Image (cartoon, rainbow, N blue to C red):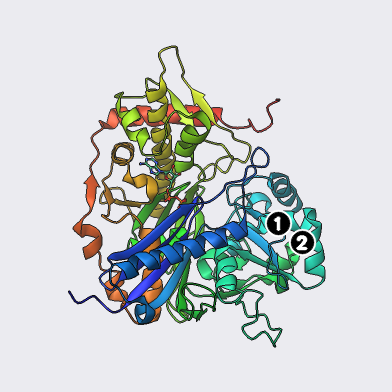
Amino acid sequence: MLKKEAFIGAIDQGTTSTRFIIYDQSYQVIGSHQMEFTQFFPQAGWVEHNPVEILESVRVCMSKAIDKATEDGHNLDSGLKAIGVTNQRETTVVWSKSTGLPLYNAIVWMDVRTSSICRRLEEQFPGGKYHFLETCGLPISTYFSAVKLLWLLENVDSVKRAVESGDALFGTIDTWLIWNLTGGSHSVDPTQNTVTGLHVTDVSNASRTMLMNLKTLDWDTPTLETLGIPSEILPKIVSNSEIIGNVAVGWPTAGVPIAGCLGDQHAAMVGQACRKGEAKSTYGTGAFILLNTGEEIIKSNHGLLSTIAYKLGPNAPTNYALEGSIAIAGAAVQWLRDSLGIIQTAPEIEDLANKVDNTGGIYFVPAFNGLFAPWWKDDARGVLVGITRFTNRSHIARAVLESICFQANDVLDSMHKDSKEKAGVTYEDFLLRVDGGASANNLLMQIQADLLGSPVIRPGDIETTALGAAYAAGLAVGVWTEDEIFSTVQLEAKATTFYPKLEEEQRKKKVESWYKAVTRSFELANLSL
Ligand code: ADP
């Protein structure tokens, strides 16, 4: 059989694992590899990754996915036309330009070590928590890169010294990967001591730092000055779909252009073909719900963020989004697996939870690192309420699944309130597109539809993040057109729709009980040992 000639690769560097997926021109996966990497929890509330381990995971995934595709008879030497990069957002790295080595571990998006810095900033500025909202669309929160960078500047001597000597580079994971993929600190020609790595980020990742102006799509000088962040350490901001540079010698895909870069949630929006008025929810380590608000920046009155949806080309229009982020979704399932040992693998939670028809009246709030949208409570911590002698492992497993859906429900509720007022989107014809590792769980998706009271549609391929990065790269090199990538035909072909079955009265009662549980989780950060 004649194999298609053009292939596009996607690096999907997530919070818990890295993937490299190679697609053919008809969006079929011809090779992929995935591997988990180490999560470091040095103190309560702290979460770190080793940037070098992440880089190596990319190398291994690339190499193994290429081997798989090659074994199956695909010619990648001439056929791999471009690579797209998508990544966990906000996670912050500072490294040395000269050695190429990180100056500290990557501080992961969910890490809350910066809560005292946030409180200080809130007290310092007249606008409090919302001082920078007008410019960057975000409240002051431990979540975003700027405060993680401030922590590094204030607490790590090697970072301070490197900034002073002009040797420091700041980046989110996309920036770290692209800088290394395009040469890092190694010169191509050993006789020339030139730094070849390209120091870039894209509009979507930049929109999560608190430092980018949402309107100009450039670093916001007044914000940088106010926070004391040196502009020299920041990368150049590019669009989501353009040729950024070529992969350097020494990598398995040497010579191939990197032509797409998007934060994971923005890539999922593209992968789910979300146009104006359409929303998607991705269930990974956290859960992230984004509604495309078109070319208009909508400011939320109900605890959501304004952010970039995507900008597919340097001259393409910018689509914005309202976003609700949930820090702990699949991570709560991992906690049951790794810390409590109630399950051996994440998918086992479905069978365990299915052993009971309901939670027996218990509610779990996984506020492990505070609560993000719509609550924004850094000092919240996890609670399990309503426990009796009757409660068993299955009830807990079911309460964990419900907690993921209740949190998504809170965000969607805010989204509907905001959009009804401002974007004309209503519940009546609402349909939620879902994806991400945990969306494979049928019970989770049914609970989501029940709690939402709207249908939930899951595409056949739930790796929409990688697909979105591939789309963006393929678009830039002319393998696909925009009409092709926004056609939902292939998404819908093998999709499963979950329809709500819960009585409205029952739904309301459960949501009320959930609110009771959520409020019990507030102000628990400093309980004594
Ligand atoms: P990320 O990109 O954030 O690393 P993924 O999209 O790979 O996340 O999804 C992995 C997460 O989904 C993990 O937290 C895991 O516990 C959870 N998960 C995976 N499969 C299931 C399942 N069948 N049911 C519930 N949770 C699951």
* Amino acid type, mark 2: Val
Q: Considering the numbered disc 1 on the image, is that residue within a helix, a strand or a loop? A: loop
Q: Considering the numbered disc 2 on the image, is that residue within a helix, a strand or a loop? A: helix
Which quarter of the image is occupied by the N terminus? bottom left
Percent coordinates x, y for residue 495 in the rendering: 23, 53
Q: Residue furthest left?
A: 1
- Please tell me which residue is depicted at 53% across the width and 51% down the height of the picture: 37
List the residue tagged with mark 1: 104
* Front residue of this view, candidates 457 and 172: 172
- Please tell me which residue is depicted at 70% across the width and 25% down the height of the picture: 529
* Amino acid type, mark 1: Tyr
- Please tell me which residue is depicted at 42% across the width and 26% down the height of the picture: 396
Above or below, 134 against 353 in this view is: below
Whether residue 206 sits left or right of residue 164 in the image: it is left
Q: Is residue 276 visible?
A: no
Q: Quick one: label 1 or label 2, which is nearer the N terminus?
A: 1
* Front residue of this view, candidates 313 and 512: 313
Percent coordinates x, y for residue 436 in the rendering: 38, 51
Above or below, 47 against 529 in this view is: below
The quarter of the picture showing ligand 1? top left
Above or below, 504 against 3 in this view is: above
Q: Would you say the residues marked 1 and 2 are in contact, meaning their CB atoms lie under 8 Å apart?
A: yes
Percent coordinates x, y for residue 372 in the rendering: 54, 45
Task: Check disc 1: other Cα within 10 Å, few if <14, some if 14-19, many if 20+.
Answer: some
Whether residue 524 sits left or right of residue 337 in the image: it is right
Task: Check disc 2: other Cα within 10 Å, few if <14, some if 14-19, many if 20+.
Answer: many
List the residue tagged with mark 2: 159
